[in-house]
Image (spheres, rainbow, N blue to C red):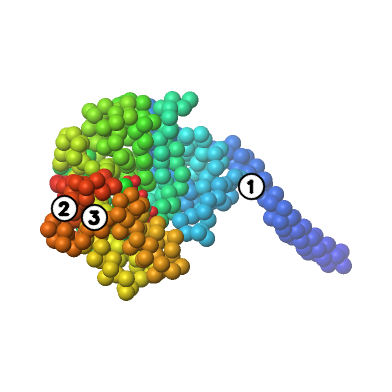
């Protein structure tokens, strides 16, 4: 009887302990106390292990950006364990309903690799890797290799591009001269009114450049490609840069030369840029002619040569914009400094039709022949001016077209009625209808003679052409 009784007691106490443990676990999980228990347990465990620490600083001793820092950060932000850190930053992603997580400062994030537990601590401008000494030899190298591969894959489909702008020297000295904001410019090659042939040429040029690492390396050349975009205001140069960045999934570093204090400052800005980026200087001709920058011509030339970038394995596309290149020192334009020259002319009828299709949804319209004739007569506005008129009249396509016609006839803002008749055009030469033609320019010369020209016209017509000078990557 006592045996039965004690057996019953044993089973009962087992059951009770089980129920207690079960309830205790439920309480721990429900209240979140489980995380405190885990933390405490980990610190007890830590007492029985020896750890080694590796620092990955954002900048090296010469304040050059450490590419490994960027890679590790990209990798860490992709880990699911980021959700378990106490503080995490939430951002909207590329798509409007997408939310991405970003590691906050002073947070510890855990990772498992080949059965080893690895910790990362996000300190100010440094990421610290903590690994057990016992695991180090076996795991560290393959782990770093793994980070490199994963971050490269993630970089290919970047969740967010960044626009970096240089700020005036601050109290940090030369460190962190760049400030970044998410780059969300929606422009793509599809949305730009340009000859599709030219767009395809640019796309394949960029594509083959991005794949030409070994080629550049073999030649012992810096892996960079430079574009010059030149043409009047409002012809789509900045939109084109955005389209390039979106196409390549590259961050944009937009250098404001007025905020650069001297040549060496410009060098530092380049050194602090990351690989796979577009380095942009807009309105270079203006800075050079007005001398509104403290940077010298030789400073700009050595910047364009890109010899300062840390290794040949880092790809960069440089883009310079100008209103015209006629008065620019030929040293700037020489092959090797500028690989591809792209001319952005004022609107012609072909470009107009693309804009009408995009902005008004019009493939054809009874007013098109009239518009075509006006273009043939040499009138032109920038795509920016035409698109603005279309946007503000988008509810009535006919009204939009009439407004555009009116603007073209008054040369945009009525500063001189432009009614060049067919005869006078024929005297000068019929425009060919290409994007930028000798004919159109001849008409512009005619208009200029009579003081009617209102935009800074590119005098030499070079058609909307891609001139790959060299380095066909
Ligand atoms: N080729 C084009 N196709 C479609 N839209 C265009 C085109 N060119 C200009 N636009 C529109 O006009 C506006 C101004 O263009 P953008 O800023 O790219 O011109 P820009 O050449 O950089 O001018 P600026 O020399 O004054 O900086 C943009 O909103 C853009 O959408
Ligand atoms: Mg611009």
Q: Is residue 301 visible?
A: yes
Q: Position of residue 197 (x, y in %)?
A: 21, 62
Please give the name of the residue rendered at 50% of the width and 59% of the height, measured from the top-left corner.
96
Q: Is residue 150 visible?
A: no
Indicate which disc, 2 or 3, sits on the residue closer to the N terminus: 3
How far is mark 2 from mark 1, CA to CA?
79 Å
Give the quadrant of residue 346: bottom left
Indicate which disc, 2 or 1, sits on the residue closer to the N terminus: 1
Q: Which residue is mark 3?
A: 202
Please give left or right for residue 104 compared with residue 244 in the image: right
Q: Secondary structure at mark 3?
A: helix
| The residue at label 2 has a CB less than 8 Å from ligand 1 | no
Please give the name of the residue rendered at 43% of the width and 33% of the height, measured from the top-left corner.
167
Q: Which residue is mark 2?
A: 442
Q: Which residue is mark 1?
A: 38
Q: Judge by depth and name the residue closer to the eye, 134 or 120.
A: 120
How far is mark 3 from mark 1, CA to CA?
55 Å
């Amino acid at each position: 009887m006592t045996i039965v009784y004690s057996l019953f007691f044993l089973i009962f106490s087992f059951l009770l302990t089980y129920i207690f443990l079960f309830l205790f676990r439920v309480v721990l999980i429900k209240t979140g106390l489980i995380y405190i228990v885990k933390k405490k347990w980990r610190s007890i465990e830590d007492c029985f292990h020896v750890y080694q620490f590796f620092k990955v600083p954002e900048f090296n001793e010469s304040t050059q950006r450490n590419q490994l820092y960027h890679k590790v950060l990209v990798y860490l932000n992709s880990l699911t364990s980021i959700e378990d850190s106490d503080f995490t930053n939430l951002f909207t992603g590329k798509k409007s309903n997408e939310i991405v997580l970003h590691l906050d400062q002073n947070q510890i994030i855990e990772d498992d690799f080949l059965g080893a537990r690895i910790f990362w601590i996000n300190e100010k401008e440094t990421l610290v890797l903590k690994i057990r000494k016992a695991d180090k030899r076996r795991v560290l190298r393959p782990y770093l290799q793994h980070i490199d591969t994963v971050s490269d894959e993630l970089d290919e489909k970047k969740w967010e591009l960044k626009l970096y702008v240089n700020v005036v020297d601050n109290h940090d000295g030369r460190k962190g001269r760049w400030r970044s904001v998410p780059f969300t410019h929606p422009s793509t090659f599809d949305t730009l009114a340009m000859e599709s042939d030219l767009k395809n040429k640019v796309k394949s040029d960029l594509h083959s450049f991005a794949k030409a690492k070994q080629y550049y390396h073999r030649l012992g050349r810096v892996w960079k490609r430079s574009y010059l975009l030149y043409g009047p205001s409002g012809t789509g140069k900045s939109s084109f840069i955005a389209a390039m960045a979106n196409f390549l999934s590259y961050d944009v570093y937009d250098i404001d030369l007025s905020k650069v204090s001297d040549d060496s400052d410009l060098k530092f800005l380049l050194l602090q840029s990351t690989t796979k980026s577009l380095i942009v200087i807009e309105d270079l001709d203006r800075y050079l002619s007005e001398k509104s920058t403290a940077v010298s011509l030789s400073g700009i030339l050595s910047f364009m040569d890109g010899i300062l970038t840390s290794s040949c394995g880092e790809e960069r596309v440089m883009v310079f914009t100008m209103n015209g290149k006629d008065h620019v020192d030929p040293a700037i334009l020489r092959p090797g400094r500028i690989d591809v020259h792209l001319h952005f002319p004022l609107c012609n009828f072909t470009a107009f039709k693309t804009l009408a299709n995009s902005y008004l949804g019009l493939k054809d319209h009874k007013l098109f022949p009239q518009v075509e004739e006006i273009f043939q007569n040499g009138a032109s506005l920038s795509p920016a001016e035409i698109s603005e008129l279309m946007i503000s009249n988008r509810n009535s396509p006919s009204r939009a077209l009439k407004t555009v016609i009116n603007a073209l006839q008054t040369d945009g803002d009525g500063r001189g009625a432009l009614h060049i008749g067919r005869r006078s055009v024929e005297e000068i030469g019929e425009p060919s209808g290409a994007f930028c033609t000798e004919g159109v320019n001849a008409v512009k010369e005619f208009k200029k003679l009579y003081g009617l020209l209102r935009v800074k016209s590119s005098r030499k017509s070079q058609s909307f052409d891609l001139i790959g000078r060299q380095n066909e990557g």
